[in-house]
Image (cartoon, helix red, strand yellow):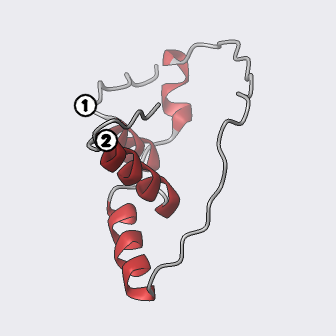
Amino acid sequence: MTKKIPKFKNYKEEAKFWDTHDISDYIDEMKFVDVEFIPRQKREESMTIRVEPELKKRLDQIARKNNISLSTIARLWLIERLKNEPSSKVV
């Protein structure tokens, strides 16, 4: 008899659970699924921004605290700022 997989409040809680439990204890709870991966077309362009080392360090600390990359937090903040600008459309 295998154990029941608990309900999780969020992904962080679930990740913590699986970090400390063996999946083979829950094998009867698992379902096989077919997954098809279709890569989306790249719509991004890259840009280089020069910042002071201390600013980069602070951004990196905030990004790590939120479990996202430095470039992701910078992009999110740019999008947020642009949304607050009048006559600015952000997709």
Q: Secondary structure at mark 2?
A: helix
Q: Residue at x 46, y 52 (%)?
A: 75
Mark 1 neighbour class, 10 Å CA radius: few under 14, some 14 to 19, many 20 or more: few
- Identify the disc placed on residue 13: 2
**Depicted 71 relative to depicted 27: above or below:** below
What amino acid does circle 1 point to? Lys
Mark 2 neighbour class, 10 Å CA radius: few under 14, some 14 to 19, many 20 or more: few
Task: Locate residue 85, reporting x and y percent.
Answer: 29, 44
- Identify the disc placed on residue 40: none
- Horizontal relation, residue 56 to residue 38: left or right: left
Task: Locate residue 63, reporting x and y percent.
Answer: 39, 62
- CA separation in Å, label 2 and label 1: 7 Å
The residue that mark 1 highlights is 9
Specify whether residue 68 is in view: no
Q: Residue at x 32, y 45 (%)?
A: 80
Q: Residue at x 28, y 39 (%)?
A: 86
Specify whether residue 33 is in view: yes
